[in-house]
Amino acid sequence: MPASADLIVLRAAGVGLALDATGTGLPRVLHWGADLGEDALDLLAAAQPVYPNQPLGAPLLPTQADRWAGQPALAGHRDGTYPHLRLLRTEPVAAMVDPAGGGTVTVHATDEAAGVRLRTEIELGAQGVLRMRHAVTSTDAGTYTVDGLLCLLPVPADAVEVLDFTGRWSRERVPQRTAFGHQAVAHESRRGRTGFDAPPFFAAGTAAFGFRHGQVWGVHVGWSGDHTQLAQRTVDGDGVLGGGELLGAGEIRLGDGETYTTPWVYFCHSPSGLDGLSDAMHAWLRARDTHPRTPRPVTLNTWEAVYFDHDLTRLTALARTAAELGVERFVLDDGWFLGRRDDTAGLGDWHVDPTVWPDGLHPLVDEVRRLGLQFGLWVEPEMINPDSDLARAHPDWYLATPDRLPANWRHQQVLDLARPEVWAHLLQRLDALVTEYRPDYLKWDHNRDLVEAVHDGTAGVHAQTAAAYRLLDALRARHPHLEIESCSSGGARVDLGILSRTDRVWASDNNDPLERQHIQRWTALLLPPELMGSHVGPPVSHTNGRAANLSFRCLTALFGHAGIEWDITGCTEDERAQLSAWIGAYRRLRGLLHSGRTVRADHPDPSAHLYGIVSTGGEHAVFAYAQLTASAYEGTTRLRLPGLDPLARYRVGLVPELPVPRIWAQDWSPQVTLTGAALAGHGLAAPLLRPADGFVLELHRVG
């Protein structure tokens, strides 16, 4: 449907956006949600305001000038004056409708008296993901201070629940629900990084929405520093959903001609539950030019295998065992650089420690490559130990007020990357390392919150985050082959801002499969499996001491970018055989796992998870059933497999490379052929499993 001068309608993948561009003010959002179809123009033209002379729709940038009584989308002032702006368009709205679906809208507006110019960009991708950002420019003498600038879209009265998240180290992304009435429900992060509790999506939806049912509207802020996401509804009308960067006091002060641009804020709508949000976002991410295109290699990371005990003989034995099992990438974790015998010293001194590595890392790297493996290396460039040569040489390089250091956290402080000399030093050291050792992969860590972050006397999180992005961009520009993982004490920096510069995230430092079942379930709400690192850990978890059998650890790690974090040189022959078979299954199935649609059943038994990946054409699928705890059911529940072609017939069986689960009481064989409709509606009888066990089904369309 083409855009007109007065009404702009974008449509893609079942999602519609309609803007009223009449008048001289900012456009008003008449609709965002389900595609209204070819009748959109007639439906919108027939709409009537509740009160005479009240305009239809929600303001694109709600402020008090629009009689909006909620949190204003733009808050600021010019040296204490003009606390409220009245923005008028300076040129017609520029709209481009893509015949393949979606399009773009650009709006320019100005408050001449206040000396402020606004530019708003909206993109609706062919996958149904809408993203928005604003840029505000000062056009007058003095200083215009931006206190807040949010991207907001309306949600209807049908949205009565909010899904938010909490979490902590090794227990990331724990869901929590809140009623959404006439109130504001906000999630704010002031940690200087995304946070363990950051929502993959902050979502509002109809009552009791689930993975496969209910209307849902979701938002994600693509920013790795302080940020906010909120849903707000006043008594005056429908609510809004949105978010943006959470700015510190005086953090953005614009001189004449200077501009502040918000991060991209991503919006998704689904008519059929949370899986619809994942469908759209996974498809959008996979369509990026920067999305990983090569098969995601099986990765062995050395952290839980050796910790700081770096020894060439031990590490080459580990690499040889890994190669024998089918591992494809070997990553040397923390402990290789100057003075780094534990976590109290060395951060900042990015030189190979000659007391541990007298010939540098070359003997290990050469052996890893001789074995046919890729080589990876751990770094944490944004942090510094006070006990380091760099800190002793440059005590003024901390991200802090001089003589007012924040308390040490993990024996470390933060380097002020926004200082040009700090940024240049880090780029030089990283460039030198990558040039010398040619790693295929960097595990880029970030192990503490930014507290009392001060740059040049003012709040420093924004400048620090932007500088970290520039550092990543510059390193990737010099070494285009290099892949980078975003790790932040595990999963504390998982967002689309960092993922526009990296190739996967480390979802959690916790490799306990029971915890990982929950963590990966919700991380995958935003990210497709190939972007989510998921490793088989040791028999007893190093984070919480829980023991788990190898088959359940393998099952859990299969549905991600799979790897191992365990000293496998001590494995029994049976354990090696299981690991080798599991690696074979992953390598055989990763084409499906990393391209298909993620589906999650609204399983009636909370003690178990049922989820899978279905190929885009519906011809091939894998489903996992994970029994997390003992069930309260006396008998068993049925396994209803969602997302299949209802008319097709499927041959169902266990993945042959993986072990048969331990069954409590009965023999069980899923060797059947049924239609997709029967598998989704009636389902399969579930076996009665022991806790912390499960199985993986593989389905092929027949006929």
Image: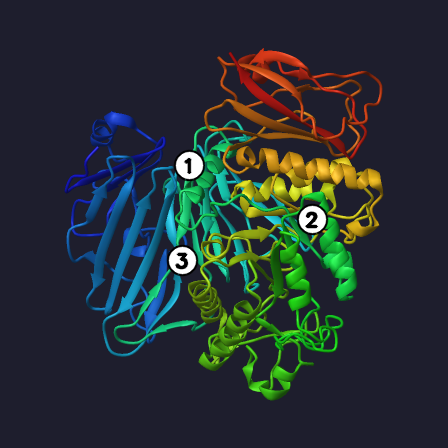
Q: Is residue 649 left or right of residue 345?
A: left
Mark 1 element type: strand
- Residue type, label 2: Ala
Q: Which mark is residue 323?
A: 2
Q: Are marks 2 and 1 in contact (CB under 8 Å)?
A: no
Q: Secondary structure at mark 3?
A: loop
Instruction: State whether residue 451 is above or below residue 661.
Output: below
Place residue 52 in its image quadrant.
top left
Residues 701 and 180: in front is: 701
Residue at 48%, 46% (x, y): give it. 183
Amino acid type, label 3 = Pro
Q: Residues within 10 Å of mark 3 (few under 14, many from 20)?
A: many
- Point out residue 68 in the picture as x, y percentages from the top left corner: 34, 51
Q: Nearer the viewer, residue 511 or 697?
A: 697
Which residue is at a point 75% across and 65% down the rendered structure image? 312
Q: Are marks 3 and 2 in contact (CB under 8 Å)?
A: no
Residue 552 image-quadrant placement: top right
Image position, residue 502 (x, y; %): 50, 56
Name the residue tied to disc 3: 263
